[in-house]
Each structure stands twice: as structure tokens, then as C-alpha cells.
Image (spheres, helix red, strand yellow):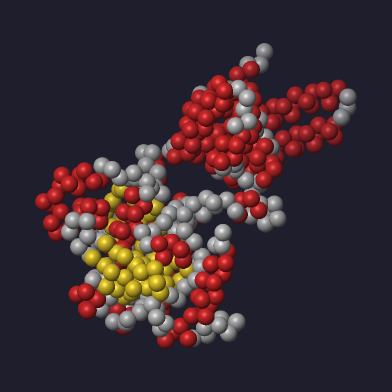
Amino acid sequence: MQNKQTNKLTQYGHSFQTKALALLVTNREFLQQVADIVYPEYFDSDANKWIAEHTIKYYNEYKTIPTMEVFKVELDKIPNEIISVAVKEQLKETYKSTKASDLEFVEKTFIDFCKNQTLKNALLKSVDLLGMGGYDDIRTLIDNALKAGVEKSLGHEYLKELEERYREESRSLIETPWSVINRILGGGLGKGDLGLIVGGPGTGKSWALVALGACAVTMGYNVLHYTLELDDIYVGRRYDACFSKIPVNGILEHKDEVKGIIKKLRGELYIKYYPTGRVGINTLHAHIEKCKNQEINPDLIIVDYADLLKGAGKERRDKLDDIYMNLRGLAGEVKLPIWTASQVNRSGAREEIIQGDRIAESYAKMMITDFAMSLSRNREDKDNGTGRWHIMKNRYGPDGMTFNSTIDTSIGQINISDRENPSTPEDNAVTNPNGLSNADRRSLYRSQEDFFNLG
């Protein structure tokens, strides 16, 4: 006699079922793959069945995963208060499980379970068809069962997946400390994006990376900061200075004050030092996976800085090309935003505004990155605590603008003006087939932005 428990997920336990639900409500590709072979009755509790049922129903209609707002609306329709409370608690537990370290195992096991159930049901139906001589029907039934649960993603289906395009979290952005950069980026750097900060030696690139990391930690994100030049203890002190606004050279005298401040931080920060030129992208990838295995799930990666990683190739340019290609690939594979920094060449280091062609050694860096901005500071700027940020490249909005900035490198305090610098010579250059200058193009963009923000 067949054990009824094998038809349910009971054998895997409550935690497994919760993680399977976490995959269903947060991973669209996974839901797409199993939507036609998973059934609510596979789950034990009424709350689990409710979540599975409404997730599949929503996907079948809108071709995407339901948001928390969708669940809130559906929860209000539950007439039984006891079931409503149970579903709310299960949803909380489900979303908490999205950062579990064994989700890959759960995903594979759950898909195998659903496939086996589909094949088993097909075989049972075949027995009845066999008695009626329905051999063609049996063949079709078994063929369909064997095809069940295969990956179905063909890419973004433009006509069907309108809802997915307009989800607020579709890019899952992490803001920077600077409102003007967030506005230009459309909210911040997203999953799989590579952001680049370019500048001369001693201009404050590393401090800018610390500011990005500190901002993310303050907002509750987990940050992995890889340092290939400064040791991890000193980088930690820079973060102390950034959080406490106490100069880094005097931070040792304010340990208790710093301790009180960092206790209130919402996110986690992990700083890992590697010697210059001794490790490559694979080492960073392995470390990220090691963190995940210990249930440390990063939201943002910072590499200070990529030029100091080990790359393949005989020439320096080839090595840098390899490093940045693989770093961009890493961002896409782990589905995390990555910020890094790079040097400019000697002539670029002396210029008032650093353009993209001044990046040292390899112009491929500009081609590969999603967003790049430069920081230029001459001797007078360093004395006065000022600098200029130039938007060199931006896949998500306008570029070519320059903004003034105040910079205090004793505490990592960087303020970028919301107002653009007066036009520079390159603003008058026509760089597009529409015959518009850079300045005209940006003015048009801002007028369009203001129009769509009305109301």
C-alpha cells in the first residue's frame, strides 16, 4: 500500500516547506519553472497551502511573483481570523527564509519532488488508459510528464511580462550617499551592476568607497568590503571615522563613543584583506560563497580596488581587461551590485575634469562598467577640501555632467552638490546623431524627468 506521506512534503519537514515557499514568492525564474507542476496540497498546513495557491494564481495571471502588497490585499479577504493570523505569521517566516544558505539544495530537491509526483500521476492514469487501449494518449501523457519542470525561461517576454517591468523592486537598487547620483542612476546601483570611481592618487577614491559601504550598512544592508591595498584594521578605522565623524587619526581615543554608535547600525560589514596582485576574481567568488554558507548574505560588494587584482594576460592592458570583464561577470553571477575604483593616467590626474579617455592602461573599463564617475582634485582642492565629480558613463540615465563637491578625508565626509557645474567646453560638443550638444541633451532629459514626475 502506498504511503500517503510520499505525496506530500511532510517527509522534508516544516523548515524545508518554508524555504520552498520563499523560493516561490521571491524567485520568478523558479516559479516559472514549477508553476504547472506544483500544487497547494503538497504542503502540510492550511497557511502554506494558502500561500502556494495565491502565488501560483497570481503568476498565472500576471506572469510574475506577487508582492507583499498583493498578499496584504488577499489577506483582508480571508473570513476566518485564525487562518488569517496563521498566514501572516507564515509569510513573515517565509520572507525571513529568503536568505537561507541552503536554498540551492531546497530548489533542486523541490523540483525533483514535483517532477516525480507528476510522473507518478501520469503512470497511475496510464493504467486506466491501458485497459481502454488508449496507447497514443498514454504516450502523450508520459511525454508531457517527462518534460514537466524543465527550465522555461526564454528571456523577458515583452508582451506578457508588463507587470514584471513595472515592479518597484525589479532592479532592487541600493542607494548611494549622494542624492544627485541616486537621481541620475534612477535610484542607485542594482543587482549585477558594476560601478566605477576613477581618480588620481590620493584624491579620495578609497574614502568614496567607504562612504558607499557605510551608507549601505546604515540602511540595513550587508556589505563585503575587499581591500587590496590598505589592511583590514585600518579600513575598519576609516569606517569608524565615517560613522562617528571623528577624524581617523584620533579614533583610538574614542573607542567607547564609536562602540555606542556602531551598535545602532542596522546592517553588517565584513572587511577582507588580500595582498596586492596575489588573488583574482575566483578568490573573491569563493569568499562570497563561503560567507553565504555561513548564512552571511551580502547585499553589496566593494573592491578597493580592481586594478590590484590578478588578471590573465602578458600585457598590463590585457590583464586589466580580463579583471574587469570577470568582475562584471561576477556581479551578474552573484546578482549583487559591485563598486570599485581605478586610477587615471598622469595627464588625467592634472586635469580639472577627468574624462573617460584618461583612465589608465585600459579603456575597456569604461566599456564594461554600468556607471562610472571621476573625482578630480588638484593641490588647491586638497587644501580647501573640494573636488569635482564628473559622470563619465551611465547606462540608466544622462552622463557628461560635472558637480562640485566638498570632501573631508579625515572622516570620509563627501558632499556632492545637487546643482551641476557651469557648462564646460565639452558641453558644446555634438556627440549624437540628433545634432544636440551634451548640455542640450541633459536639459532635455531634465525637462522630461520633471514632466513625468508631475503629480
Identify which residue, 70 or 295, lies in the foreground: 70
Report x, y in % for residue 146. Answer: 70, 37
Report x, y in % for residue 221. Answer: 38, 47
Judge whether residue 154 can be spotted in this image.
Answer: no
- Give the total of numbered labels: 0
Identify which residue, 134 or 381, lies in the foreground: 381
Pick the quarter of the image with the C terminus.
bottom right
Pick the quarter of the image with the N terminus.
top right
Judged left or right of residue 195, residue 345 is: left
Asked if 247 appears above or below 316 in the picture, the reply is above
Judged left or right of residue 333, residue 141 is: right
Asked which quadrant contains residue 47, the reply is top right
Report x, y in % for residue 445. Answer: 54, 72
Q: Residue at x 83, y 33 (%)?
A: 137
Identify which residue, 5 or 89, lies in the foreground: 89
Asked if 259 appears above or below 275 in the picture, the reply is above
